[in-house]
Every structure is written in C-alpha cells, then in structure tokens.
Amino acid sequence: MLNNKIMQNNKIQPNKNRQNRPKNLNLFTIRMPINALVSILHRATGCLLFLILPLLLIMLQLSLSSAEHYQMAQSLMNSPFIKLMLLGLAWAFFHHFFAGIRHLAMDVHWMTSLMKARFTSKAVLGLGVLATLALAVKLWAW
Amino acid sequence: MILEILTKRYPGLRAWLLQRLTGLVIAIYSIGFFVRLLVLQPNSFEAWHAFFDPCWLRIATLLMWISLSEHAWLGVRDVLKDYVPNVRVRTVLTKLVAIVLWLYLAWAVWLLYSL
C-alpha cells in the first residue's frame, strides 16, 4: 500500500503513524552483501560450535580413557559419514576462526574501508574453504 | 580484576573486551594445538596420551577452556537477546546455557586432572 503511494508520488513520505511503516521482513527479497554473509555465518558457526561442545568432550574422554576406547573412537572416525560431519564442523571452526581474526583486525582499525572489508570477507570465505579442503585431503588420502 | 577497574563505568565495554581477549586466547591455543598435532602426528593410544601428558599443555588447555566458556557465554547470550523476544523464555534459556557451560568446565577440569 505504502509502496504504491511511493511509486505514485515518486518520493518517500514521512510516516505519520507507526502502522504505515514499510515492512520488508522476507529475508529472501534482501540480497546479502558479502560482509553480511560473513557476519551471519560467524554467528551461525558460533552457535553450532557451542552446540557440539559436549561431543568434543565425549570424544576427548573416549579417546583418552583407554586403548580399547581409543580404538573405538578411531573406528568411529573412520566411517565416511562421520568424516563428512567432521569436515562440516571443521569448516564451521575454520570460518569462525578466520572471521574472528577479521573482527580483531577491524577492531585495531585495519582493513576497515568498504572495499578492503569486502576483500577480507572474500579472504575469510576462501580461507575457510581452503582449510577444510586441506583437512579433507588429510582425512581421505592418509 | 584489571578489566573491572578499566571498564567500571562501561559494563558493555567489559563484555566487548572480554569477547576479544578470550577469542584471542582460543585462537592462539588452536594454532599451537594444530602445530603440535602436525609435528607429533599421534596415531596410537600411547602417542595420543603422551600428546596430552605435559603439565604445561594441560594448564594451557584449562586456560583455553575457561576462555572458551566465557566466549561462548557472551556469544550465546547475545544471540538469545537478539532472537528470543519473550523475556521469560529467554531467562530460562540463558540460565540453562550458563549451567551447561559450568558443567562443561567441570567436566573439562576433571578430564584434564584424571589423565
């Protein structure tokens, strides 16, 4: 309704009341800039990493308690499905790691202009994928 | 303590600074851990156990885990603040996260001690 009004008048009118404010909450209509993508992935991977903390502790406990349990953990890790999940989680860690470093860099006012920030965003995404690929090679080829 | 004095008038700054400092601790630990893994390449139970044997590594791991608890606490708390508008539900979830993180810390301490 308001959009029509805007199109008719070809200018944005100041809102007299709150009900007339435009709502555009359909996220699929918003194109995400690369910086936003890195940011939301940083948050999402952070949540994921928090959720898998008990798994990390269980695996650590299992692998360190005795030789038999170590074998058990080892054979668990050898199944392809688990390996894939591990890769996914490793990507989450790598992305969170690199995006975190990017945050720290920006906190000391390094790489803060828009173009530079876009470049570091690409670097963060690329490094996360590269590190995961390197781990994949290590997991499957060795 | 120094943090508290420095940020006495700005409690938000304390959270911000702690998030960064703990993140830095975890990052440095991760790099060190990764390098140690690459150098030693433990592929048996004995080697894996020996990997965690040195006292300094256990202390470092403990420090890292304390940082991790704080880091996760600040992060998840912010996420809950953003996405759970119902105050009662949020309070319950936030407390649950705190309890769970304390339990993980106790677990980690016990694990490192009983090696």
Image (tube, grey):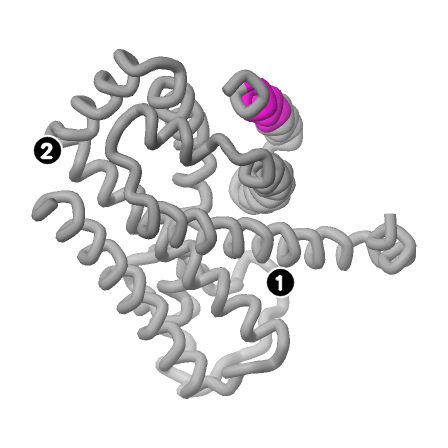
Name the spot of residue A111 as percent of width and height, x first. Answer: 50, 83
| A3 relative to B90 in the view: left or right | left
Q: Is residue B47 left or right of residue A134?
A: right
Please state which of residues A62 and A50 is positioned toward the viewer in this rendering. A62
**Measured along the vertical axis of the image, is residue B112 above or below residue A17?**
above
Badge 1 amino acid: Asn
> What is the x, y in percent for residue A82?
18, 31
Q: Is residue B73 visible?
A: no
Q: Residues within 10 Å of mark 1 (few under 14, many from 20)?
A: few
Q: Nearer the viewer, residue B90 or B74?
A: B74
- Residue tagged 2: A80
Residue, x 10% and y 33% (percent of image)? A80
Dot 2: few (<14), some (14–19), or many (≥20) neighbours within 10 Å?
Answer: few
Q: Quadrant of residue A23?
A: bottom left
Q: Is residue A35 above or below residue A59?
A: below
Residue A117 lies in quadrant: bottom left
Give the x, y percent position of residue B63: 63, 40
Judging from the image, mark 2 belongs to the subunit labelled A
In the image shown, does B105 or A109 lie closer to the viewer? B105
Task: Decide whether the magenta segment is chiefly helix, strand or loop.
Answer: helix
Q: Position of residue A28 (x, y in %)?
A: 28, 58
At a point 31% along the width and 69% down the height, the residue shown is A31
Considering depth in this image, is B96 or B18 the residue closer to the camera?
B18
Residue named by callout 1: A17
